[in-house]
Each structure stands twice: as C-alpha cells, then as structure tokens.
Image (cartoon, rainbow, N blue to C red):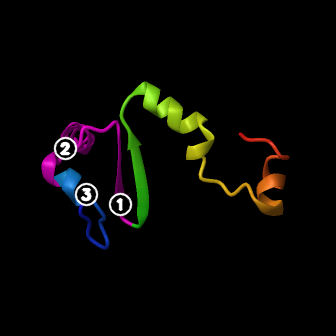
Amino acid sequence: LPRLPLWGSYWILLWGNYKFPHKNMWYYMKKFKSKVISMWMGDFYTVVANDFDTVREVLTKREFDGRDTTGFAGKSRAFGKTL
C-alpha cells in the first residue's frame, strides 16, 4: 500500500471507511487475495493476519519470530530455548 511519511498507510484505511478502518483491511486482503498484508502505520511496519490458522502460524513458527538467535544475547535471552 502507498504511504505518507507521517501517517504511513493509515490514511488509506481511513479513506476507505473512516468509522471502521479494520473493515478496510478485509477489503485489501480480498483485493490482493492474501491472508496476510503488511503496511506502514506511521513509522512502524505492521503485518496483519486474516484468519485463525494464519495467526496461529505467525505466532508459533520460528520463521516469523524475528528475533536474533545468533551470538550471546540471542541465546541468553531465553536460556537457549525458543519461546
């Protein structure tokens, strides 16, 4: 989604449905035929998952963890185990 420096892609969600911007996320998920979309919410890169199975996969798989597991800090943070 296109973005502006201060607002990110949030203005597109407001433009589509000002009272219920979360409904506009459903619109874009159907438009792009994807269960996961990403956008900029101001300075933060945000990933939105659509259904229960996708949310579960994102929260449980190691590929989506996004944490550094190399080096001392990555291994000592969780005592060498994944969360």
Label located before the other in sequence (2 or 1): 2
The amino acid on which the numbered mark 3 sits, given as a three-letter code, is: Leu
Quadrant of the rendered structure where residue 19 is? top left
Could you tell whether 57 is left or right of 3 in the image?
right
Label located before the other in sequence (2 or 3): 3
Q: Nearer the viewer, mark 2 or mark 1?
A: 1
**Number of other residues with Cα within 10 Å of mark 3, as a class: few under 14, some 14 to 19, many 20 or more:** few
Label located before the other in sequence (1 or 3): 3
- Residue 52, image x and y in percent? 43, 26
Q: Nearer the viewer, mark 1 or mark 3?
A: 3
Q: CA distance from mark 2 to mark 1?
A: 20 Å
Which portion, as a residue range, is magenta? 15-42
Residue occupied by mark 1? 40
- The quadrant in which the C terminus is found is top right
The amino acid on which the numbered mark 2 sits, given as a three-letter code, is: Lys
Question: Are the residues tagged 1 and 3 within 8 Å (C-beta)?
Answer: yes
Q: Is residue 6 above or below residue 71?
A: below
Q: CA distance from mark 1 to mark 3?
A: 8 Å
Residue drawn at (51%, 30%) of the image: 56
Q: Which mark is residue 19?
A: 2
Residue occupied by mark 3? 1
